Image (cartoon, rainbow, N blue to C red):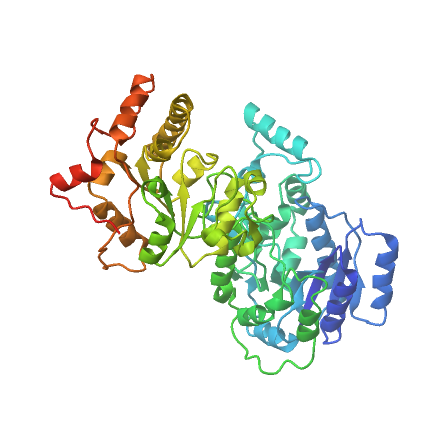
C-alpha cells in the first residue's frame, strides 16, 4: 500500500512537473489537475514532460477561480481518477503545484502506514474558527455567492448587503454541520470514496456551489459524516499573514522549513533553486524522523506578522507607511526639545553637550537652514541642512534623524520663530521630552537694535505662536513628557530645572551640577516689557517682571543663589 498525490496546478508548471516526477519515481501515483484557464501550449508541455511516467495521470480540467466551486470540482475529478486507476493507494494527499516535499517519501509512507484509518484534515466548527479574515464565518453557509470576490468585488459586496437587508437565509441541509479548515488534506481511500459516492452528493454539491470558499468547507464538513478517525490538522505546512494571504517560502527559509518536521510545504517561490535542489535530492541524510510540528516555527511567524503589521518603531518606508496615529512608535528613540534655553543662556548647546554627554543641535527647524551640532552641513543618513528639503516633509526629516542616530540621544532647540508644522507630531510622541521656558523669545528682542514698533509687532506674533504651541502641550492628548516654566520663575532658580533635565536625559544620572551656563543680561528687562504694554502689546507668557527689578538680584534676595560660569 502507498500514498497517492493529487496536484492542483495553475502556474509554474515546470516546478510542478519536477515535484510530480519526484513522487512518481518513488512509487507514489500522481494525478494532476491543471486549471482550465492555463493556455494549451504550457499544458501540452507539462503532459509531454511527464509522458514517460506510467503512474502519472491528468484529470478533466475546471476553471479554478479563488473562492469558487471550481477548486472543489477539480479536487473531486482528480481524486476520482486516483481511486479508479490506482488500487494500491491507501491515502490520498491533496497538494498544489507550488508544494514541495520536505521529508523523504519513505518517511511519509511509513507514517501513514502506522495510521491506516486516520484522516488528516483540519475540520473545525464555525463557532471555533479564529483565523478567517473579513468575516462571513457562518454567513458563507446561509447566503448565496454567485459573484467572484476578486473579479466582481462590487457585485459581491452589493449582493451580500442586499441579502442581509431583506433577511435572506439559505437552508443548510439537515444532515450537515458546517465545518471549516485548511484546503490541504490527506484522506484514506475509504473516507474519500465515501464522500465521492455519497447518496446525496448531487444535492450536497448544488448547495456547496453557492457557498463562499467551498474548498475550505466541503471536505471538512463531509468528513465528519463518513470518517471514524479524524485528526484535525493538515500534514502540509501552510502559513498565512494577517490579511489571510499565504506566506511564500524562499531560499533563505531552508532551515526554517527543516525545523517544522512537516512532510510538505506551500507556497514555494518558483525561483527558490536552493529549496528545490535540497528537498528533491536523494541525499537527505542528517534529518531525524519526527512528528510534524509546525508549531515549532509559529513564534517566528508571529514575529513576522508583528513586523509586517507594526513595523519597527520610528521606521517609515515605502513598503510599510502606516496610517496616521497607527504607528508603532512615532520615532525610534528618546530625544529632547528645548524651547527658550538658547535664548536665556549663552552657548547653551555647548554647555548641555558637556553636561549630558549627548549630541546637542541648534534650531533644527529654523527658517534659514538646519542648524546641526557643530555647524555640520550633512548629518547621519545624508540629511542636509537645506531648509527647503527639510520643509518638503518635516515629519520624515525628524523621524529620519532619530532613526539614523538611534542609540545616541538627540537634543535640539525649538521656538516660535521656527517652522511649526511638527507641533502636534512632537506633542503626541511618547519619546519626546519637551522643556519650555515660556516667553524666552523676548530676550533676543530685548537685546536687538530694531525700531520699537517692529519689536512690538514681532513680539505679538511670537507670543501668539508660542501660546498655540503651549495649548497643544497642555491638551489631553499629549504623550510627550512636558515641563513648562515661565521666564520669571525659571531665572529665580535655574539650577533645579537644569538638574531635573540632565537627570532625565540619563547618561550621567546621580551627578550633581555645580555650575550653570552664563545667563544673558536681563537688566532692564522689566522696563522693556512695560514698554511693550505701553505700546499696546500685552506680554503674558514671561511671568512677573516688576519694572526696575534686577532678576539676578531678586534671585539672590530670596535665598536662592544663582551660579554663573
Quarter where residue 213 is shown: top right
Please name whichever residue, 460 or 246, is drawn nearer the observer in this view of the structure.
460
- Against 154, residue 296 (above or below) is below
The residue sitting at 50% across, 65% down in the picture is 297
- Against 412, residue 381 (above or below) is below
The residue sitting at 72% across, 47% down in the picture is 70
- Asked if residue 236 lies left or right of residue 293, the reply is right
Quarter where residue 392 is shown: top right
Please name whichever residue, 252 or 103, is drawn nearer the observer in this view of the structure.
252
Residue 123 percent across, percent down from the top left: 53, 54
Residue 529 percent across, percent down from the top left: 29, 26
The residue sitting at 52% across, 56% down in the picture is 380
Q: Is residue 362 visible?
A: yes
The residue sitting at 21% across, 47% down in the picture is 496
- Against 255, residue 79 (above or below) is above
Q: In which quadrant is the N terminus drawn?
A: bottom right
Q: Is residue 91 visible?
A: no
- Against 99, residue 213 (above or below) is above
Please name whichever residue, 23 or 427, is drawn nearer the observer in this view of the structure.
427
Residue 56 percent across, percent down from the top left: 79, 67
Residue 25 percent across, percent down from the top left: 75, 75
Amino acid at each position: 500500500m502507498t500514498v497517492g498525490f493529487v496536484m492542483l496546478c495553475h502556474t509554474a508548471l515546470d516546478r510542478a512537473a519536477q515535484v510530480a516526477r519526484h513522487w512518481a519515481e518513488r512509487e507514489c501515483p500522481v494525478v494532476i489537475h491543471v486549471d482550465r484557464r492555463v493556455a494549451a501550449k504550457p499544458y501540452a508541455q507539462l503532459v509531454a514532460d511527464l509522458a514517460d511516467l506510467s503512474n502519472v495521470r491528468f484529470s478533466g480540467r475546471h476553471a479554478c477561480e479563488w473562492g469558487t466551486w471550481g477548486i472543489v470540482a477539480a479536487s473531486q475529478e482528480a481524486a476520482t481518477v486516483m481511486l479508479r486507476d490506482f488500487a494500491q493507494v491507501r491515502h490520498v494527499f491533496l497538494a498544489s503545484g507550488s508544494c514541495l516535499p520536505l521529508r523523504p517519501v519513505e518517511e511519509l509512507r511509513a507514517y501513514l502506514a502506522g495510521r491506516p484509518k486516520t484522516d488528516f484534515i483540519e475540520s473545525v466548527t464555525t463557532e471555533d474558527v479564529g483565523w478567517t479574515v473579513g468575516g462571513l464565518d457562518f454567513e458563507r453557509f446561509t447566503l448565496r455567492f454567485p459573484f467572484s470576490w476578486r473579479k466582481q468585488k462590487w457585485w459581491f459586496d452589493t449582493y451580500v448587503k442586499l441579502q442581509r437587508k431583506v433577511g435572506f437565509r439559505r437552508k443548510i441541509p439537515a444532515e450537515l454541520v458546517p465545518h471549516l479548515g485548511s484546503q490541504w488534506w490527506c484522506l484514506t481511500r475509504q473516507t474519500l470514496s465515501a464522500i465521492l459516492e455519497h447518496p446525496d452528493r448531487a444535492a450536497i454539491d448544488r448547495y456547496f456551489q453557492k457557498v463562499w470558499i467551498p474548498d475550505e468547507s466541503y471536505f471538512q464538513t463531509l468528513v465528519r459524516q463518513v470518517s471514524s478517525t479524524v485528526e484535525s490538522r493538515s500534514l502540509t505546512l501552510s502559513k498565512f499573514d494577517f490579511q489571510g494571504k499565504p506566506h511564500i517560502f524562499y531560499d533563505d527559509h531552508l532551515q526554517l522549513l527543516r525545523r517544522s518536521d512537516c512532510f510538505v510545504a506551500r507556497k514555494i517561490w518558483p525561483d527558490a533553486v536552493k529549496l528545490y535542489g535540497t528537498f528533491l535530492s536523494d541525499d537527505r541524510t542528517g534529518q531525524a524522523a519526527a512528528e510534524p510540528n509546525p508549531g515549532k516555527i509559529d513564534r517566528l511567524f508571529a514575529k513576522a506578522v508583528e513586523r509586517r503589521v507594526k513595523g519597527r518603531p520610528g521606521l517609515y518606508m515605502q513598503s510599510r507607511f502606516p496610517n496616521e496615529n497607527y504607528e508603532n512608535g512615532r520615532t525610534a528613540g528618546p530625544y529632547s526639545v528645548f524651547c527658550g534655553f538658547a535664548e536665556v543662556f549663552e552657548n547653551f548647546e555647548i554647555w548641555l553637550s558637556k553636561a549630558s554627554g549627548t549630541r546637542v543641535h541648534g534650531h533644527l527647524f529654523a527658517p534659514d537652514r538646519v542648524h546641526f551640532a557643530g555647524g555640520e552641513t550633512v548629518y547621519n543618513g545624508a540629511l542636509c541642512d537645506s531648509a527647503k528639503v527639510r520643509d518638503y516633509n518635516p515629519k520624515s526629516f525628524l523621524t529620519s534623524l532619530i532613526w539614523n542616530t538611534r542609540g545616541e540621544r538627540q537634543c535640539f532647540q525649538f521656538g516660535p520663530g521656527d517652522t511649526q508644522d511638527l507641533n502636534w507630531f512632537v506633542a503626541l510622541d511618547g519619546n519626546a521630552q519637551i522643556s519650555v521656558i515660556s516667553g524666552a523669545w523676548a530676550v533676543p528682542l530685548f537685546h536687538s537694535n530694531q525700531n520699537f514698533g517692529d519689536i512690538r509687532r514681532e513680539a505679538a506674533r511670537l507670543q501668539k505662536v508660542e501660546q498655540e504651541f503651549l495649548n497643544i502641550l497642555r491638551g489631553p492628548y499629549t504623550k510627550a513628557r512636558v515641563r513648562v516654566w515661565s521666564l520669571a520663575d525659571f531665572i529665580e532658580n535655574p539650577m533645579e530645572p537644569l538638574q531635573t533635565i540632565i537627570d532625565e536625559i540619563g547618561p550621567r544620572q546621580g551627578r550633581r551640577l555645580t555650575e550653570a551656563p552664563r545667563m544673558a543680561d536681563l537688566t532692564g528687562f522689566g522696563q522693556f516689557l512695560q514698554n511693550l504694554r505701553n505700546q499696546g502689546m500685552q506680554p503674558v507668557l514671561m511671568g512677573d517682571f516688576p519694572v526696575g527689578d534686577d532678576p539676578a538680584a531678586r534671585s539672590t534676595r530670596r535665598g536662592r543663589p544663582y551660579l554663573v560660569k
